[in-house]
Image: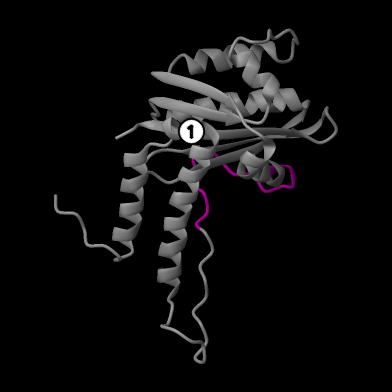
Amino acid sequence: MSDTATMHIDGASRGNPGPAAYAVVLARPGLPVVEEADVIGTATNNVAEYTALVEGLALARELGVPRLAVFSDSELMVKQMNGEYKVKHPDMLPLYREAKQLAAGFADFRITHVRREQNKRADEIGNDALDGRPRKRGQAAPPPPTTPAPTANASGPPQTATDAGVRADALAVLASAARAWAEGGVKAVPVEAVWEQLWSVLEDGNVLKKKKK
């Protein structure tokens, strides 16, 4: 079973420099997604991006993640972390050094550039933080909304909120795996972990029988 977690990060600054925030979306095999986003005062986009990386790495270390694949839409930061560009700006150097130190603590660490449309959730909660709706460290991602039960004249079998929730949770697991595959290829998808997470969702929803220990 793969123990590589995936993390999407984003930083935003309205004004550059201006009011800024960072966002982290951490997905660990077989465990709920954890999200974190908060404001950091006035800063540039680059400082916000590096803050997201530092805060995300600290969160992953705190949660005991052994191996981590990070995805960011900041090409500059990714190339700097991968040694392709040098960091010269004095506001970014301390954050860069802290990020490198934290990254060295993982058994395996890699950071990859993705397009902005592949980083939607991190972008969304970062903007939520700027709008006064932060997500605190360790707070689990909210569950998908459940579909209300149909009215008496609806066709087909009745659908309960629990049924809808199980389906939504299962689709969320598959969607997360699909995103990881699209962004990092086959090697980025911990297949056994995805299957066990999906099986667990279906077991908890009484769709499948519990595995015998």
Up/down of 197 relative to 1, above or below: below
Residue furthest right as drawn = 15
Q: How many marks?
A: 1
Up/down of 198 relative to 114, above or below: below
Residue furthest bottom as drawn = 153
Drawn side of residue 115 relative to residue 32, left or right: right
Q: Position of residue 166 (x, y in %)?
A: 40, 63
Q: Main secondary structure of the magenta part?
A: loop
Q: Indicate the colouring scheme.
A: one colour
Q: Does residue 181 appear in the picture of this structure?
A: yes
Mark 1 burial class by Cα count in 10 Å: few <14, some 14-19, many 20+: few
Q: Amino acid at mark 1?
A: Gly
Q: Could you tell me which residue is drawn at 14 percent across and 49 percent down?
A: 213
Q: Could you tell me which residue is drawn at 40 percent across and 70 percent down?
A: 163
Drawn side of residue 131 relative to residue 111, left or right: right
Q: Could you tell me which residue is drawn at 49 percent across and 91 percent down?
A: 152
Q: Secondary structure at mark 1?
A: loop
Q: Nearer the viewer, residue 96 or 119?
A: 119
| Residue carrying label 1 | 185
Residue furthest left as drawn = 213
Drawn side of residue 180 relative to residue 127, left or right: left
* Residue 144 painted magenta: no
* Residue 132 painted magenta: yes
Extent of the magenta region: 129-143
Q: For residue 77, which quarter of the picture? A: top right
Q: Position of residue 125 (x, y in %)?
A: 64, 44
Q: Quadrant of the N terminus?
A: top left
Q: For residue 117, which quarter of the picture? A: top right
Q: Nearer the viewer, residue 40 or 5?
A: 5
Q: Could you tell me which residue is drawn at 52 percent across and 71 percent down?
A: 147
Q: Position of residue 58 (x, y in %)?
A: 51, 26
Q: Does residue 140 appear in the picture of this structure?
A: no
